[in-house]
Structure formats: C-alpha cells, structure tokens
C-alpha cells in the first residue's frame, strides 16, 4: 500500500495491484507488444492456471519510489528498442495520469519474440 | 527533394521496382513538406517524440535503403523498403509504419511489377500485418486509416484496374477516415483534432498520388498566403491584436463541446480542452469581459490570465532587433554597388527579400537595402539603424510588404532629428516604381507624394504555392495548388505555374498596358524563367517583356505590369 496524498483530512492509498491493473491496460494497447510473460516458466504456468490479470507485471516500492517491471513478448520484425521505449512512456503516462503517483522507473524485460503469422522470416 | 518524373497519365497500369522507388520517394517528399502539420496534431502528452517527425525519419530510412538500388523487381524493392523502415523506425508511429511496409512487401513479394491487383493485395496485407502486432488495436488511429484504405482499394478494383484511379479513391477515403478518427477516439474529440498518425499516412499516399498526377511535391512555405488568408479571416487587422485570455473552468457535468462552440463564437485562436470536471480555455478576443463572464456562468474560474497582445507585439518588435542587428553589422561587408549618398539629399531605405532584388534596388539608387520580406520581417530596430546610418536627414522608407508597415512606421517615429516618411509600398514592384520616382534633390513632401503616386501606378502579381485549402475572395484553392495574387489579393489558382502566370496577367489587365517585368525566385532556374518569359512574349507579342533575377524565396515569380 502506498500513500498518494496525505493531508489533514485523510489519506488515499493505492495498492500495487491496482497499479498493475492500470499498467496491464496500457500494455494491451501498446503497439508491438503481443503478449505478457512471467519471470520464470513456472510463473507462466501458474498464471495460465489462475488467469492472473497482472501476469508479467511487477509493481514494487524501493524507498518510497514506485518501480514497475513488465515482462513482455514483442512482435518479431519490429524495432524492439522503439517498442520498448514506447512501452516505458505509455505505462508511466497511464499510471501517473490515473493515480497521480510519480513513477520512478519502468523496466521492460523482453522475454520473447513472436513470429508473425505465416512468417517466412 | 524533388522526385524525378515518372511517365504518368490516365491508363497507367503497372510500375516496376524502379518506378515504385519514385513512389516511395514521393511519399517521403510530401510527408517532409507536411510533417509539421502532423506534429501539430499530437495530443498525447506522452513523451514519445512527435508523430510527424517520427514518421518522416522512418520513411527517410526506408527510402535510403533503396535510393541507390537499380533492382527492377518490385517485390525485392518493397522488401528493402520494409528493412529500411524497420531499422529506422522511430516512435510508436514509426513502428506501425514499418509494419505496414512489412505487410505490403509480403503482399507483393512475388510481383515484378505493381498492378492494380497487387496494390490491393499489398494494402490488405499491410493492414493485416499492422493489426497483428498489438493485442488490442485502438481504433481511430493510423491502423483504422490503413484498414479503410485497403477496403477502399479492394472496392475500387472491382470497377477499375487503373492505378491512378484506385490510388485516388484510396487517398480520398483516407481523408474521410482521418476526419472520422475523433468519433472513434474520444481523446481526439476532446482536443478537437484528428489523429496524427492517420494524417501522416494520408500524406504518404497522397504524395504518391501527386507523383502519378504530375502535381508538384515541393511546397514553398509561403507564409504570405497564410498571412493573407488569416488577415481576411480574423479581425486582427482592423482592431489590433486584442487580448489573450486563458482560464480553467471547474465544475460538474461540463459540456466540453458546447463550451468550445460558444468560445469559438466569441473569439479566434481558440483552444478548449478538458473533461466534464475541468476545462482549459484559451482564446484571443477583443472583449475579455465577455469570455470571462461566459466562463463564470459555466462553473468556477481558476487561473484567469488576460494579456494585452498589442503591447506584447510592440515589445517583441522592439526587443528583437538588438543583438541581431549588431551581429549583422559586423558580418556584413560593405557592398560595392551601394551608392554614396550626399549630405542633405533625400535617401531611400528599402526592404527586399533575395539577392537579386537587393541588387536591383541598389542599382536603382536605394541608399540602403534591408534583407527581409514575407517570412523574415526586419525589426523596427533594423530599419532604424539603416536610417540612422545614412549621412542625410531626409529619408524615405519603402517597406514593400504589408507586414513590415508597422515596424517601418515605428522606425520613422523613432528616428530623432531626421525627417523620415514611409511610402506604403505593399509589393516589390510598387517599391521599385516608387524608387524610380525618387528625386534626391527635390522638396521632401513633394517627393514623397510623387513616389506614393508612382507606386500606385503599377499592377503587381505574385505566384506562389497555397499552404492550405481555403476559399478566399470567391477563389477556391487546395493546399499545394499554385496560386496567383493580384495586388495582394488571391485571384487565380491552378495546377501549374505557367498557366497561373498567364491567367494572372490576364486578370491584371496586361492587355491594356505595355511593360511586363518578371522577377524570378530562388526556386526557379534561369532556363525555366527564360522559357516563361518566352511564353509571355508569345501571349503578348506587342508588349515589352523584361526578365530579372529576383532570388526571392517562396514566390516563383513576381510580376509587374505598367
């Protein structure tokens, strides 16, 4: 849980799960990202079984600073550096806009590439 | 960049890899001319660079990959285009564009030449490929425009197998699709813009169509036209610059669209963005009270800022000259052709764009020529320095452009101890006529009167490219069309320079006059100008036709008839 605003009249708390949900929405519409992946193969399996909506997204705090790790699968044949930096911008923007908490870092882990359909490459 | 000509015309059915190269070049060229417009549509504050710039750099990389290739096979060239786009993809829009090229290349990979059916297949594959690379495609973006383009191409193929016909329909559909993007994507509607990526894609396809039609791909950004149009459309001329008003409205259930409509009816340069709880308003008005009153009736006002733009403008004009003038003075060598001015005589200071025109003014006896014109107005200080530098205390200023009047008037007033008068010449030919009437030893008042009269005797024509689509003075122009202005008024529009020049001369009443002078600009070669003069001479066999190198930017030709 974290503090968004602490004033005299009370506090607003936003959980990492809520932030992960926002991030996952941002990733769904990120161009070039075709899927999410876990850090480990076991994680992938578990996610499939539980249909975890935050699959592939890790939200944590380090000394009050918000860090979001995303584990993604990117379309093969796109410029990965550009897709990844778009992801960073997009996730940061969506989260900051929605909850107003500054995002310290967004780390993109490219866990795999997906070949395009009927690809010959 | 000017693409080489491709044999064009109706009935053209195929093009090989080398022809296709020119298509890519044309798409790039047209985007390069228009990318700033695309940038201006960027509404997402996501720091992902500007869409127009990103798409342009991606296209440039794509074109560079094939620029030096002699490969005639279309499929091979298309694959190279994708490679280039992939390597140079910049930003989100660049990545999408690279995927479109990838699909296109896949669609035509077996084809040696582009036919109508392979074009359609290419566009369909492009769309399919582009949609594949995202989990949830967002509609109202470049993707939507690409999809509609492919749909239209497919429908068009059923009626025709003519490439230009199909491409024409595709481009038209793209324009419609772009117009509809705000209906699909609320964030666009709220900002009152269309999708930037879709617009960029449309420019690329439109560039290709322009090549097929033989239309020009180089636009000189003739700010003139914009200014001319703007002054017709906005009240800045008569009532000054007015006030810049900004505020936030806070409330509940605010109707952004309704508020935008109302604000637009109150002023100009409006920007109304926000949501039902908070709206940002920015507008230029003559009566700030009205617009603030309206805002207060809609909700609570915050951060109200009202600025007097007339003041700002004058400050700007005054401040601007300082450092620039200093550097110019030290860098500028004394010109050999500059005539020496005797003490006590009447001297003229003229403003002119381009080396050729500068030389002409000097040769006709101007004491000082300040470089400037349509898009590079000299400051009041530039003019004042020029006036003060002359060893005489009687000076006439020839601004030669409406936009410079104010600076010239201010310079005239600020020139202490000198008699300075502005002869309000609006065009270069007017300035030249006025200068010809200058008698350095005459009575000041009389000379000014003579010069003013003389400037009014000449008819001015200017030929340039329209920077936007508009209807002014009953003339409909499309962006990119060649237009002719008669005495600063938009008079004719057409698709090629030569016919516009002839139409314009006709409208200027050249028939009843004797001397036609043609000043050609920096985008026209001497040979083209000689040819143009020949055509004019043929149309007016009894007139005297003179050709001069003007070297002016933006205008192909400046014409004077007297």
Image: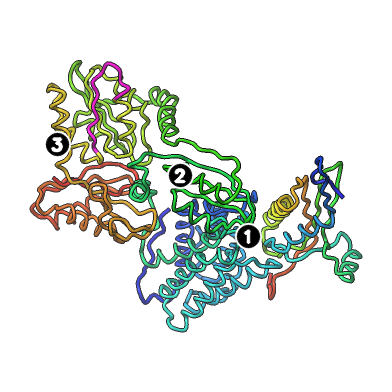
Instruction: Name the residue beneath numbered marker 2.
Output: B284
| B335 versus B290 height, above or below | above
Q: Earlier in the sequence, mark 1 or mark 2?
A: 1
Check residue B453 in the rendering and tell me which mark sits there, or answer none. Answer: 3
Q: At which x and y percent is residue A110?
A: 78, 58
Secondary structure of the residue carrying tag 2 is: strand
Instruction: Name the residue beneath numbered marker 1.
Output: B95
Q: How crowded is mark 2: few (under 14 residues within 10 Å), some or many (20 or more)?
A: many
Q: Which of marks 3 and 1 is in front?
A: 3
Q: Are marks 1 and 2 in contact (CB under 8 Å)?
A: no
Q: At which x and y percent is residue B297?
A: 55, 49
| B376 versus B164 height, above or below | above
Between B1 and A106, the one lying in front of the other is: A106
Label 3 marks a residue whose chain is: B
Between B427 and B409, the one lying in front of the other is: B409
User: Same chain, marks 3 and 1?
Assistant: yes
User: Same chain, marks 1 and 2?
Assistant: yes
Q: How crowded is mark 3: few (under 14 residues within 10 Å), some or many (20 or more)?
A: some
Q: In this view, does B460 lie to the left or right of A68?
A: left
Residues rendered magenta in the picture: B413-425
Q: Are marks 3 and 2 in contact (CB under 8 Å)?
A: no
Between B147 and B104, the one lying in front of the other is: B147
Secondary structure of the residue carrying tag 3 is: helix
Q: At which x and y percent is residue B186?
A: 60, 62
Label 1 marks a residue whose chain is: B
| Residue A53 falls in image quadrant | bottom right
Q: Nearer the viewer, mark 1 or mark 2?
A: 2
Mark pair 1, 2: CA separation: 38 Å
User: Same chain, marks 3 and 2?
Assistant: yes
């Amino acid at each position: 849980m974290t503090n968004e605003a602490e004033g005299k009249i009370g506090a607003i708390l936003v959980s990492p799960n809520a932030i992960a949900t926002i991030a996952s929405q941002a990733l769904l519409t990120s161009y070039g990202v075709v899927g999410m992946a876990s850090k480990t193969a076991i994680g992938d399996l578990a996610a499939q079984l539980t249909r975890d909506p935050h699959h592939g997204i890790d939200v944590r705090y380090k000394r009050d600073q918000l860090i979001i790790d995303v584990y993604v699968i990117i379309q093969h044949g796109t410029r990965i550096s550009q897709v990844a930096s778009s992801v960073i911008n997009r996730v940061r923007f969506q989260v900051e806009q929605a909850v107003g908490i500054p995002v310290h870092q967004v780390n993109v882990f490219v866990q795999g590439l997906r070949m395009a359909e009927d690809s010959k490459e | 960049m000017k693409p080489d000509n491709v044999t064009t015309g109706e009935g053209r059915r195929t093009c090989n890899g080398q022809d296709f190269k020119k298509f890519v070049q044309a798409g790039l060229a047209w985007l390069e001319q228009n990318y700033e417009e695309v940038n201006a549509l960027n509404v997402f504050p996501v720091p992902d660079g500007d869409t127009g710039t990103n798409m342009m750099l991606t296209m440039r990389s794509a074109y560079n990959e094939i620029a030096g290739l002699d490969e005639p096979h279309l499929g091979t060239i298309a694959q190279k285009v994708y490679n280039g786009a992939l390597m140079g993809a910049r930003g989100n829009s660049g990545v999408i564009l690279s995927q479109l090229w990838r699909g296109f290349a896949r669609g035509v990979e077996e084809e040696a030449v582009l036919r109508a059916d392979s074009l359609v297949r290419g566009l369909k594959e492009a769309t399919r490929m582009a949609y594949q690379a995202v989990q949830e495609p967002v509609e109202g973006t470049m993707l939507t425009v690409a999809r509609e383009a492919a749909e239209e191409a497919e429908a068009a193929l059923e009626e025709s197998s003519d490439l230009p016909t199909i491409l024409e329909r595709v481009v038209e559909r793209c324009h419609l699709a772009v117009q509809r993007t705000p209906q699909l994507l609320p964030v666009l509607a709220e900002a009152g813009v269309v999708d930037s990526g879709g617009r960029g894609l449309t420019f690329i396809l439109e560039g290709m169509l322009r090549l097929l039609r033989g239309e020009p791909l180089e636009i000189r950004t003739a700010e003139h036209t914009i200014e001319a149009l703007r002054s017709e459309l906005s009240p800045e001329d008569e009532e000054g610059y007015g006030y810049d008003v900004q505020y936030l409205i806070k409330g509940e259930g605010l109707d952004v669209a309704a508020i935008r409509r109302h604000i637009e009816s109150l002023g100009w340069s409006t920007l109304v963005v926000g949501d039902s709880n908070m709206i940002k308003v920015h507008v230029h008005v003559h009566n700030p009270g009205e617009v603030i009153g309206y805002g207060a009736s809609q909700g609570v006002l915050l951060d109200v800022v009202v600025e007097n733009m007339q003041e700002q403008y004058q400050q700007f004009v005054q401040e601007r000259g300082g450092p620039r003038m200093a550097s110019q003075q030290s860098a500028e060598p004394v010109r050999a052709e500059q005539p020496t001015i005797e003490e006590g005589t009447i001297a003229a200071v003229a403003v002119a764009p381009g080396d050729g025109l500068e030389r002409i003014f000097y040769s006709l006896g101007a004491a000082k020529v300040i470089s400037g014109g349509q898009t590079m107005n000299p400051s009041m200080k530039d003019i004042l320095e020029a006036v003060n530098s002359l060893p005489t205390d009687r000076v006439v200023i020839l601004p030669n452009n409406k936009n410079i009047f104010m600076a010239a008037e201010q310079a005239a007033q600020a020139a202490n101890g000198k008699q300075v008068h502005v002869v309000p010449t609006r065009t270069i030919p007017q300035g030249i006529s006025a200068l010809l009437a200058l008698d350095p030893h005459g009575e000041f008042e009389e000379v000014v009167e003579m010069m003013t009269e003389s400037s009014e005797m000449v008819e001015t024509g200017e030929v340039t490219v329209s920077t936007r689509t508009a209807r002014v003075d009953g003339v409909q122009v499309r962006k990119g069309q060649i237009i002719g202005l008669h005495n600063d008024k938009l008079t004719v529009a057409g698709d090629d320079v030569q016919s516009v020049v002839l139409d314009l001369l006709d409208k200027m009443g050249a028939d009843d006059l004797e001397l036609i002078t043609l000043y050609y600009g920096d985008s026209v070669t001497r040979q083209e100008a000689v040819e143009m003069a020949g055509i004019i001479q043929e149309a007016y066999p009894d007139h005297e036709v003179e050709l001069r190198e003007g070297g002016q930017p933006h205008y192909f030709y400046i014409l004077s008839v007297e």
